[in-house]
Amino acid sequence: MQQEEIIEGYYGVTTERKKSGAYAKLDFWQSATGLVLALFMIAHMFFVSSILISDRAMYAVTKFFEGSLFIKAGEPAIVSAVAAGVIVILVAHAFLALRKFPINYRQYKIFKTHKHLMQHGDTTLWFIQVGTGFAMFFLASVHLFVMLTAPHSIGPHASSYRFVSQHFWLLYIFLLFAVELHGSIGLYRLAIKWGWFKNLGIEGLRKAKWGMSAFFIVLGLLTYGAYVKKGLTQKHEGIMSIQQAIQLDEELHKEGKE
């Protein structure tokens, strides 16, 4: 290791006594990866909520992301590739964000005392973001692993089967609140940090943040209910395996071609 790197590592300044730019670079990449994940979250919610329109609409969205515009039958491996990319970005974002977490009990107590004394709303939002981010690292990883390894099992019938018969409803209800709160708070903090939408002002951005949280949580709960209802109906009708559910989705594709 060069002497310049040792000095910068210990003191956070270069040999020319200039403040190291490494922290700013890490901060930029944390913001960039967070923005990509937040925008993906918004798009993902709209895509999965297509089941509120109809089974055929949800399946059409699924096939679209399998590249049905270019590949006649679609290719689930494309979904796996997207899931792999999201996993890489998620791990990078979590790694960059961890450096700001309280790393021991003493730091946690200092932060808690500071939050109590300051009574500052944005400090409380940051604390919520830390908690939801920690939860997402585990909850989202399970969901993304399924999308990575079983992309062919995405569809109105197969996804509903996963919700109810494979008990993913328990994972998804916690993931819904963690993702929506973390994402909306993150976008709000990014807007303030980088000076976006200055004309709205702080109060305007806060209203937009809470409006966004409420909208996506309500949309998420309605979508969640639709998948659970369909899953329960399928269970009552004797759909006892994921293969049967996938076959029902494939029949939608055949009907669409007729």
Image (cartoon, rainbow, N blue to C red):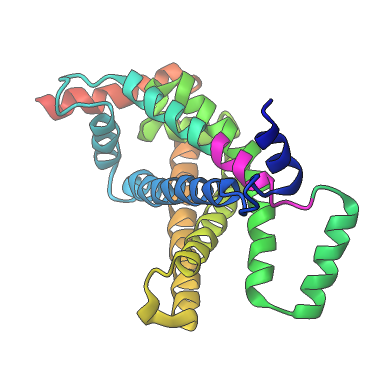
Q: Give the left or right position of residue 26, taking residue 65 as reference.
A: right
Q: Is residue 157 above or below residue 33?
A: above
Q: Is residue 234 magenta?
A: no
Q: Position of residue 243 (x, y in %)?
A: 43, 16
Q: Is residue 96 magenta?
A: yes
Location of residue 254 by image quarter: top left
Q: Give the left or right position of residue 199, taking residue 108 as reference.
A: left
Q: Is residue 250 above or below residue 116?
A: above
The answer to which of 90 and 237 lies nearer the viewer is: 90
Q: Give the left or right position of residue 61, taking residue 226 as reference.
A: left
Q: Is residue 108 above or below residue 79?
A: below
Q: Give the left or right position of residue 106, taking residue 210 as reference.
A: right
Does the rendering let one see residue 236? no
Q: Residue at x 34, y 18 (%)?
A: 77
The answer to which of 72 and 158 lies nearer the viewer is: 72
Q: Position of residue 13 (x, y in %)?
A: 67, 49
Segment tinted magenta in the rendering: 91-102
Q: Is residue 244 above or below residue 57?
A: above
Residue furthest out toward the front? 16
Q: Residue at x 43, y 70 (%)?
A: 195
Q: Residue at x 69, y 46 (%)?
A: 99
For the stretch drawn in magenta, the main secondary structure is helix
Does the rendering let one see residue 129? yes
